Amino acid sequence: MKKIIAQALQILQQGGIVAVPTDTVYGLAVDAANPDALDALYVLKNRPASKPTSVLIASADDMSSWAKNIPDSACKLAQRFWPGALTLILEKADQVDSKLTGGTNTIGLRVPKHPLTLTLLKQLATGLATPSANPAGEPPAVTAKQVRDYFGNRVDLVLEGGESALQLASTIVDCSKKTPRILREGAIATQQIKHHMNIT
């Protein structure tokens, strides 16, 4: 595993694209702090510039590198559901590139529950801009083979992490306003979120 992680790190640091496994689906990942890599990612995905891209981070401790005015509700949800299939929408930090956020003042953050990708994140010491690994309009890839079938050699490296466990998108909770709100139910059921915290 060390060899493939080192290879992935080198590619990401040079602005390349790596497909990574997560507990939900496979994602296409670039260094979230590299504007040129973000441009290449959006071209590969044929993704509109107005559509935000969430960022994978290594732990809840990294939230403050990407977000500001983080409310207690977000910290409580992160403590309960991270690593896992929960994306938190927070007010973006001032230094965050607007390319990541589609020009909005919020950013989506998640700690994935996959040992390979978590190891990569811890060694990268930044975040990974990671939309799902599929061309626009196609189902998200849940295996490394599906990623290769979709993109071939247009992705610099595909990390083989087995079949995605959940095969559903993450649940998205907006914590950027006073009252948290569920924007999308995914792998974590709305009931689970509401049971843990009184939100709509």
Image (cartoon, grey):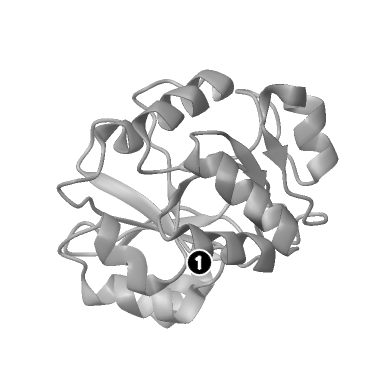
Residue at image x 61%, y 67%? 113
Q: Residue at x 46, y 72 (%)?
A: 193
Residue 36 on image: x %, y %? 39, 27
Residue 83 lies, with reference to residue 52, above or below; the image says below
The local secondary structure at tag 1 comes to helix
The crowding category of the residue bearing disc 1, from other C-alpha atoms within 10 Å (few below 14, some 14 to 19, many at least 20), is few
Q: Is residue 69 above or below residue 148?
A: below
Q: Quadrant of residue 134?
A: top right
Q: Which x, y percent locates residue 39?
A: 42, 24
Count the marks. 1
Q: Which residue is located at x 24 percent, y 31 percent?
A: 103
Residue 71 x %, y %: 21, 71
In this view, the residue in front, 100 or 76, is 100
Residue type, label 1 = Lys
Q: Quadrant of residue 1?
A: bottom right
Residue in the picture at 68% in, 63% down: 116
Residue 83 higher or lower than 34, as above or below? below
Residue that carries the numbered disc 1 in the rendered image: 122
Evaluate whether residue 130 shows in this view: no
How far from the left and from the top, in percent, is residue 29?
Answer: 55, 42
Q: In the visual, does 60 lie left or right of 18?
A: left
Q: Is residue 22 left or right of residue 149?
A: left
- Res 187 seen here: yes
Quarter holding the C terminus is bottom left
User: Would residue 185 appear left or right of 94 to someone viewing this image?
Assistant: right
Foreground pick, 18 / 107: 18
